[in-house]
Amino acid sequence: MSNTANFDYCVELSLDAVRQIFHLAFKNEDLFPHTVGPIDIDLGGGLTGTVMVSVLDDESRPADLAFADAKHIRFDVPNDITIEIPSAPDPNLSRITLSSTARFPGRLNSWVGDDGQPWLGIRFDDVTPGDVDVIGLTGVPVIGAQQVTDAIHSKYLTLPHRYTAPAPGGTAELLVYDGTADTTLLPPAPGSPAITGSLETVGGTEYLKLTVPIHVDVPTGYGSYHYLSFSTVTCWRAVVRTDTTITVDMADEPADPTVATQVVLDNASPGHDQVLAQLRPLVIQALGGFGTPTSAAYSQAAAIARIQQQIADYLHDLQFALYTPVSNQQGVTLSTPVGFLLPATGTLAVLMNRRSGTAADDVAPDDFRGAADVALAVGRDNVIEKSTAVIDAAFPGVNTGSGADINRPQGHATLKTCHAEPSDDGAHGKHPGHLWITGEAEVHIDCWPDPDVSFSGPVFIDATPHPDDPAGCWLELKPRAGDFDVGESCCDVLLDILIPIVGWIMLAVVENLIDKIGGQIATETADATVQVVSPLPTVVIGIAQMECCLDTIVISQQGFVLPGSVRIRRDGRSFDDLQSQGATPRPDQP
Amino acid sequence: MAKRSDSGTGKSRPAPPAAGPPALKITTHRALVGERTAIIAALAADPRSSRMLAANPALALRAVGVQLSPAIADHILHAVQQPAEVRSRRAELITALTKDLGTAPHPSDPARLAEILFGALHLHPLATAGRQPTYLPAIPAASQDRLRALLPTPDHRLPARSVPTPPTEPTAPTAPPTRPPPVWRLDLDAPVPPLPRARSRPKQVTLPELWFYLPSHELVRPLLELGILEVSVMPVLPPGAFAKVRDGGQTGGLTDWIESVTFPRGSRKAAPP
């Protein structure tokens, strides 16, 4: 394990910083459509509907994310699902709004985008319904006697309410009432009774028990006498439930005599029994006219399962690009960033420039961020590589056997070897962490054998942050040789050689780091000072500007770490802006 | 003149004391060269010798039992502190300037330099306060070109920021103040900006300030060159500080970096005739 694993560079962002970016990105309709649909769906039982989904991230129902494991971010997205069912038997069920919070994983992944740039982002192509949690689901209608009866009321309006049949001496007439739904019926039913319904279980079967007000006018066959009576019909129809529907076949007269249709005539005058015999088929026919009302009747579990499936299907082809390093050199494509999540400390790590192995060898880095919002790391091997390159360029011949001649008024020497390596705080008895410089030189002395002098010592890097510069924050890095009393002129020779070289080492390491991770640039001043101005891309995902300010540098045997803070500036209006105006998104106006 | 020993070889070898190495007494250059094997052996026998040599070679030799005459000790220190050609050039400059000025120059002495400029040469004082002379880069231009090639985006750097005032505290609690470049990097051939006259004659003039007087008189350049050579010497520690090194202490100086000083067993350089 190391700060940069098998890569050269690593950027670590805190969960809080990622959350800030996420919330801002969530406001971007282009990236995260707040309304999804309409989507046509089959609700089963012949019912179809259209679905509109509104995703939310407001004050009362905020979206959120967490780091689930090394490769997955767990998103919590509040949502309202509105289902329009034009053919719903119960008009009250023709528009259903379900509210919940969908929790699903997104996988960190890298790819080359259409722009040719390597991207790190989130993909959902491996999300299965089982990966989706539907939390706090509300709004799933419970389909009971009232809802089925309401469906009967609704169907009543579409049916004829007067039924006739030939009868001895004339025509038998049956009027079916439902409250005041049809005021044209004559005679009107006293008290305008409505059809009533309830659910009963008889012999292990669930029935819809309906009581239907009727009026009968049946010729008796005795002259012009008619049998007239207000009555009620009581019928039982089996209820068929599935996980998603409830169906009642009103034409299906039960075979069980205990639940056979009953007609009760109020008028007990002669002819009662004859009338009943003539009327019963007509009543059953009238009841059959109500058809087979079917309602979507999702159980809570079935509703959740359906939402899980819909979300998984919807997410499958989605991907959200989060980060790309942007080269300052035109035409240069940087290596693909590889992301890891460190859930224990809430850290997103982005590794760049694979130094060894293949993708199969990639492992998560250590958390070097500490309490900082962001931290950049350069691996030890890279620091040493850059240091060696700088030393070789500054002193041609060094480290090759021939050596590099150094001539000063104080004397002449041949620098044979020189190396710099990052060292821990406390290593070599020196504090804090430092670059440990070692080397060997042949010193030329008149009239005397030239001795070989081996030397070693620390060079520290003083970091001075400038967080409040009106032009933007920046960090100043300045090398300082250790073990020297600055007042001693004796140190001038070595200082004048070492400090500029270490300044160049810092510049080479930091500027390559900045270039690879996509920051803007570092600058160098004449006195070996390195200025890190913009260490990360300032524009993130098109909606916010993320400004990274570095605070210091920490040198250890693992390399360099530059911790800092993140400031996010919105390109457009932010949630805070909207909140201050009382214009935060509402569920009905996303 | 070195005192010759009884043997005529410039060295004497008295009976060794009961403890410690036998003493070598070096009083001539010939003995210094002729006994180098024994001297190197004496140094090699003392594990403290490396840092002692870096601190003060003459005292280091004495510490390992090599007795040096004052003249030889002086010779060793001069040889270590500056190369022969530099010492030769320094002597040339002293001779010429002494002749021209009528007095011995000591341009590294700011008070003496002020006397020379405004007394002997009758120059007008210049308002040099707050001005920085031009220095040669610490890293030669050719090396800088190679170093720039290591950078990914040499053409895209932002201009350097100036430090806002008041500056924030550096993270290193003991960070020293910024030091000016060493005087040996003063660019004697760079154009010197014209400066207004100072209101008063300063009592002292430093070598960086002298740089601004280069166009004022033909003797300023040799004065500046000599001044640079006078201060550009490898340092040696005085006896008190040397004793600290000898006893294993840290000096806070160059010697703390020295791990070893090893003389070759064979001669990589021909001995002088």
Image (tube, helix red, strand yellow):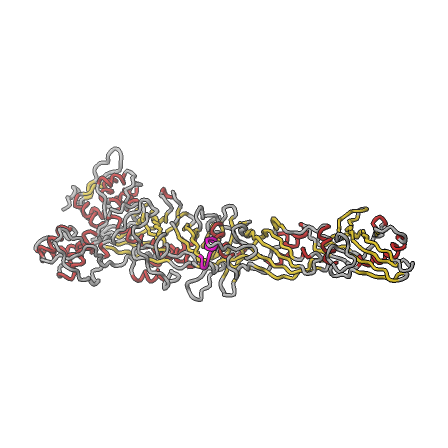
Residue A65 appears in the figure: no
The stretch drawn in magenta includes residue B75: no
Q: Nearer the viewer, residue B141 or A526?
A: A526
Q: Is residue B75 left or right of residue A418?
A: left
Q: How many marks?
A: 0
Q: In the figure, is residue A501 to the left or right of A199?
A: left
Does residue A137 show up?
yes
Q: Which residues are magenta?
A: A570-580
Image x and y of residue A95, in percent: 65, 57
Residue A43 in the image: state x and y as whole percent. Answer: 69, 58
- Percent of width and height locating residue A146: 71, 51
Pick whichever, A131 or A33, lies toward us. Answer: A33
Q: Residue furthest front?
A: A224
Q: Compared with residue A483, is residue A151 higher up or lower down, i.e. above or below?
A: below
Q: Is residue A298 above or below residue B59?
A: below
Q: Please tell me whether residue A577 belongs to the stretch shown in magenta.
A: yes
